Amino acid sequence: MSTRRLKCVLGVAVCVAGALGGCSATDNSPEGIRYNLTPELQTMWQRPVDVGNQVSVTYDENIRMFWEDLHRGALVDRPTHLSKYPSPY
């Protein structure tokens, strides 16, 4: 058998083996590709890291707004207007 014919037979054997077994996916477990097509995303466009950052920013803003509302409700958010000295407010 010549070298050229041997290379051709081996090439065909590799192609057939790849076609028969290379693309078969029978994994239907929750870890499989069919369960989660985009494992790097948690929402429609955010990764888990981005969601954690958004939650942290939202929590921080809510706490700061709570204290601001508390100061406004207690009337300590600006100096009194009864003073005879000028005030920037």
Image: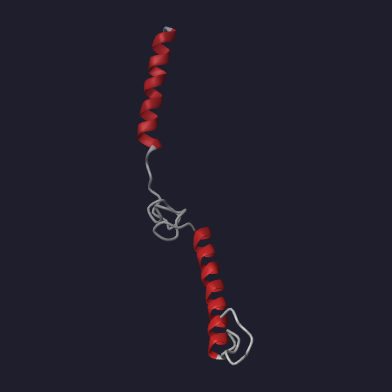
| Position of residue 34 measured from the top left corner of the image (x, y, whole percent) | 37, 53
Q: Tell me if residue 14 comes above or below residue 54 in the rendering.
A: above
Q: Tell me if residue 7 comes above or below residue 60 in the rendering.
A: above
Q: Residue at x 63, y 90 (%)?
A: 84
Q: Residue at x 45, y 58 (%)?
A: 46
Along the viewing direction, whichever of 75 and 21 lies nearer the viewer? 75
Name the colour scheme. secondary structure
* Left or right, residue 85 beside residue 26: right
Q: Quadrant of residue 29?
A: bottom left
The quadrant the N terminus occupies is top left
Along the viewing direction, whichever of 59 and 61 lies nearer the viewer? 61
In the image as oriented, which residue stretches furthest toward the top? 2
| Position of residue 74 measured from the top left corner of the image (x, y, whole percent) | 57, 91
Along the viewing direction, whichever of 82 and 62 lies nearer the viewer? 82
| Position of residue 20 measured from the top left corner of the image (x, y, whole percent) | 35, 34
Q: Tell me if residue 87 comes above or below residue 4 in the rendering.
A: below
The quadrant the C terminus occupies is bottom right
| Position of residue 61 measured from the top left corner of the image (x, y, whole percent) | 53, 73
Q: Residue at x 37, y 41 (%)?
A: 24
